[in-house]
Amino acid sequence: MSSIIRKNHQYRITIEEINLPAQQTGQQLDFELQDREDLFNVVKNLQKGSGLETSLATKVAVSLRLLGPIMMENRKHPLFVDFMPHFKAFMHNLKSTVKSAIK
């Protein structure tokens, strides 16, 4: 069995600072993401089955797809080691909640 995770979905993430005075230009972050999951499908499923308001479900879905793979790849890193069991329990609960609601 191969330990290589297929990352066949590619995305560009752009975050822009808004709501500034007219004379100021906001800061911007722009980066690319490769993921094995279809991010748009993850968002759609969380919007349907999480019980969260649509905009909140979207933010949760995107943030989880940004954080989750990094944590999995670095689960023994001191930053993540204590949080990992809680994250794993959260993800199991979230997935079962969404799966039950969509059926």
Image (tube, rainbow, N blue to C red):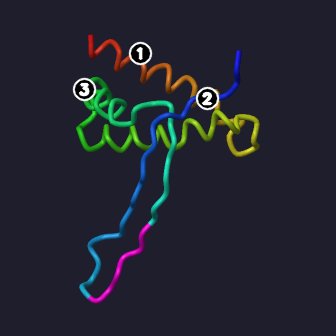
Identified by mark 1, the residue type is: Ser
Image quadrant assignment for residue 16: bottom left
Frontmost of labels 3 and 2 is 2
- Which quarter of the figure is the C terminus placed in? top left
Is the residue 75 above or below the residue 27 in the image?
above
Residue at the image point whose x is 42% and y is 52% from the top: 12
- Which quarter of the figure is the N terminus placed in? top right
Q: Residues within 10 Å of mark 2 (few under 14, many from 20)?
A: few
The residue at which mark 2 appears reads as 5
Mark 3 or mark 2, earlier in chain: 2
- Give the CA distance from mark 2 to mark 1: 23 Å
Identified by mark 3, the residue type is: Lys
The residue at which mark 3 appears reads as 48
Mark 2 or mark 1, earlier in chain: 2
- Give the CA distance from mark 1 to mark 3: 13 Å
Residue at the image point whose x is 26% and y is 44% from the top: 55
Identified by mark 2, the residue type is: Ile
Q: Is residue 27 magenta?
A: yes
Is the residue 38 above or below the residue 100 in the image?
below
> Which residues are drawn in magenta?
23-28
- Give the CA distance from mark 3 to mark 2: 27 Å
Residue at the image point whose x is 46% and y is 20% from the top: 93
Dominant SS of magenta comes to: loop
**Residue 42 at x, y = what percent?**
37, 31
Task: Name the secondary structure under disc 2.
Answer: loop
The residue at which mark 1 appears reads as 96
**Residue 54 at x, y = what percent?**
23, 38
Q: 73 left or right of 63?
A: right
Q: Contact (CB < 8 A) between labels 3 and 2?
A: no
- Asked whether 12 or 65 is in front, the reply is 12
Task: Name the secondary structure under disc 1.
Answer: helix
